[in-house]
Amino acid sequence: MVSGTALRGAGAVVGAAGEAAPLRVLIDGVQTGLVPVWDRGIGYGDGLFETVLIRNGAPCQWSRHLARLALGCGRLGIPVPSARCLEGEARPLIEGLDAGVLKVLITRGTGGRGYRPPAQPQPRRALLVYPLPVWPPDCYTRGLSVRYCLTRASENRSLAGIKHLNRLDNVLARAEWTDPEIAEGLMLRDDGQVVGGTMSNLFLWTGTTLDTPLLDRAGIAGTVRALTLELAAGLGIACRERDLRPADLNAARGLFLTNALIGVWPVRRLDGRDYDPGLLPWGLLKAVAQAAQTAEWPTP
């Protein structure tokens, strides 16, 4: 078992997180990194994945990740592995780790050549443990720089919101910059509406209202995005999911990004426009950051 200290020491900086190799891999319950090249996840991107933060040997927001995985499997017609199965395989992989990343990947399994899926698919499960990326310690208070991407987000209402394996849009968008000062890139649809970051969801603060892009045509409905909307409503903050354009972001008092690993990132600068992170609703941001790191296993 890899120690938590080893995980912390193996972290990467902003812009290099993708270079870290997995520390442990489990394929269909077996400790191996081998997958048949005719797996439909490789040939067609036929599957889904979840990226889960690990704290103190347990997954954070586990129930939300399982719920989104089940939703995505239902949308794609892939039999969803049971929560008991996934928990049973994940526990020995992550117990004892102070911090890390658990990637849960589900494909439709093996199949013959051609797009037609097998009538009775046998899904493949892959669980991978990675080091937790290391970000600048002041990024949560000082804020980070963000840019717009030229690569547009593909639109498909059947796939919008779920975390399917077809992520080439995000790959190409993230390849657009190497400047370590740029932490994230925002992607637009072809009609100019903002979808969100290459790896994150976007929130806009007007001073009284919290806005986030409507994800009915593109993008991923993140687990921390849902958490943010719930906590904001509980604090009496009005929330809206709506179409947003760059002009709306320019007029905002503040912006912040969310995902399962970063929790909350305030934005300090976006393509020449400066923002004051101090104007954001910090009561909400702190609540989201804390809740996003809440580790949980289901009650036996």
Image (cartoon, rainbow, N blue to C red):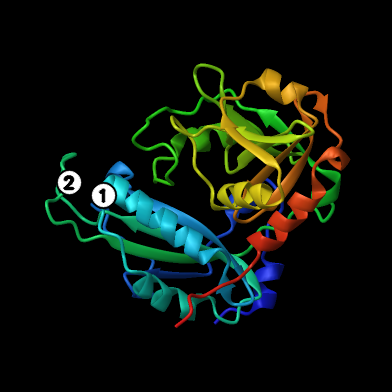
- Of residues 280 and 235, the one nearer the viewer is 235
Q: Residue at x 19, y 39 (%)?
A: 115
Q: Residue at x 31, y 65 (%)?
A: 81
Q: Is residue 194 above or below residue 295?
A: above
Mark linked to residue 117 = 2
Q: Residue at x 48, y 33 (%)?
A: 169
- Of residues 181 and 224, the one nearer the viewer is 224
Mark yes or no: residue 69 visible: yes
Where is residue 18? Give x, y as percent: 58, 51
Mark yes or no: residue 175 visible: no
Q: How many marks?
A: 2
- Which circle's residue, 2 or 1, is located before the other in the chain? 1
Res 142 → quadrant? top right
Where is residue 80? Give x, y as percent: 30, 60
Where is residue 106? Give x, y as percent: 35, 57
- Of residues 236 and 189, the one nearer the viewer is 236
Q: Is residue 74 above or below residue 204?
A: below
Q: Residue furthest left?
A: 119
Mark linked to residue 258 = none
Task: Indicate the quadrant containing the N terminus: top left, top right, bottom left or bottom right.
Answer: bottom right
Q: Is residue 141 left or right of residue 256?
A: right
Where is residue 236? Give x, y as percent: 71, 46
Looking at the rendered structure, the kind of residue marked 1 is Arg
Mark 1: secondary structure: helix
Give how far apart the Cα atoms at labels 2 and 1 are: 9 Å
Residue on which disc 1 sits = 40
Task: Indicate the quadrant containing the C terminus: top left, top right, bottom left or bottom right.
Answer: bottom left
Label 1 neighbour load within 10 Å: few <14, some 14-19, many 20+: many
Looking at the rendered structure, the kind of residue marked 2 is Pro
Question: Are the residues tagged 2 and 1 within 8 Å (C-beta)?
Answer: yes
Res 278 → quadrant? top right
